[in-house]
Amino acid sequence: MAYVIGEPCVDVMDRACVEECPVDCIYEGGRSLYIQPDECVDCGACVPACPVDAIYFEDDLPAQMGEHLADNAAFFADPLPGQEAALGSPGGAATLGPLGVDTPLVARLPRRVG
């Protein structure tokens, strides 16, 4: 089990959750953040830090955000656009830095302005 970042994060990426994560498992895409499910220790420290309520324990993910569960895992399991191999479990977001790309689900969402 792991935590999942849903649609409210898209185009917001506040990063307060990144600061609270004790295991550095929250990675930055182009328009959204993603939690590496194998690196997450299910502590929940990220949840209250998120100002847009985008982070849920996977069993508590609202039905309307259900597709984000598989999408979050796909960020690490499938090659991202422009990359030849999947990220897998890189072992820490800070050393990898922002990736600048997103999964197809996030990439096709309308841009949020404001």
Image: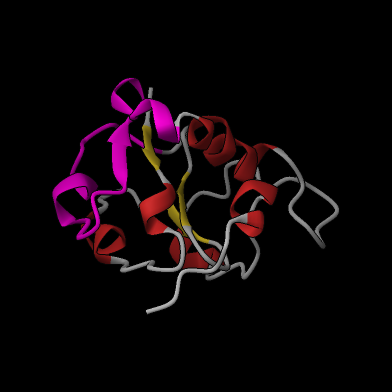
Q: Residue furthest bottom?
A: 114
Q: Nearer the viewer, residue 68 or 74?
A: 68
Kindly identify the residue that appears in the image at 73 percent across and 45 percent down. 86
Q: Compared to 36, does 31 lie above or below?
A: below
Q: Residue furthest right?
A: 84
Q: Compared to 22, does 113 lie above or below?
A: below
Rendering quarter of residue 102: bottom right
Q: Nearer the viewer, residue 112 or 28?
A: 112
Kindly identify the residue that appears in the image at 48 percent across and 42 percent down. 36
Q: Compared to 16, does 34 lie above or below?
A: above
Kindly identify the residue that appears in the image at 22 percent across and 56 percent down. 50
* Colouring method of the image: secondary structure
Relative side of 74 to 25, left or right: right
Q: Which residues are magenta?
A: 40-65
Relative side of 112 to 70, left or right: left
Kindly identify the residue that appears in the image at 57 percent across and 68 percent down. 30
Q: Quadrant of the C terminus?
A: bottom left
Rendering quarter of residue 98: bottom right
